[in-house]
Amino acid sequence: MDPRDTPGYRLHRALSNLNSIDIEQLDDPDRQRIVEATTLLEQVGLLTRPGALEETDATVDS
């Protein structure tokens, strides 16, 4: 099975790519964008994993 066919593959790749960026070399607005994008992708990850919200006691704003 091709790993790109598994649920969450693109989400995982996007998070990996964002986490690999050296934000110390960016200016403040770009740093903020990276932090916001990472946070949003992590929230989507919580929504797409069954039972994840119950495990972490996290809340997601709608």
Image: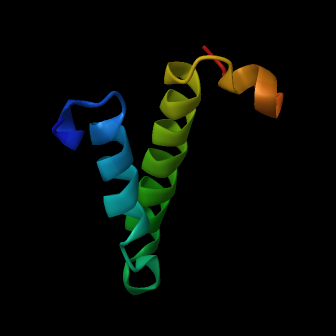
Position of 48 relative to 15 (above/below): above
- Residue 31 x, y percent position in the rendering: 45, 67
Residue at point 23%, 41% (across, down):
3
View extreme (right): residue:
57
User: Can you tell which quarter of the image residue 50 is in?
Assistant: top right
Position of 62 relative to 31 (above/below): above
- Quarter placement of the N terminus: top left
Residue situated in front as seen by the camera: 24 or 3: 3
View extreme (front): residue:
1
Residue situated in front as seen by the camera: 56 or 24: 56
Image check: 2 left or right of 60? left
User: Can you tell which quarter of the image residue 16 is in?
Assistant: bottom left
Residue situated in front as seen by the camera: 26 or 44: 44
- Residue 15 x, y percent position in the rendering: 40, 52
- Quarter placement of the C terminus: top right
Image check: 7 left or right of 36? left
Position of 53 relative to 2 (above/below): above
Colouring of the image: rainbow
- Residue 52 x, y percent position in the rendering: 67, 26
Residue at point 29%, 31% (across, down):
6
User: Can you tell which quarter of the image residue 11 is in?
Assistant: top left
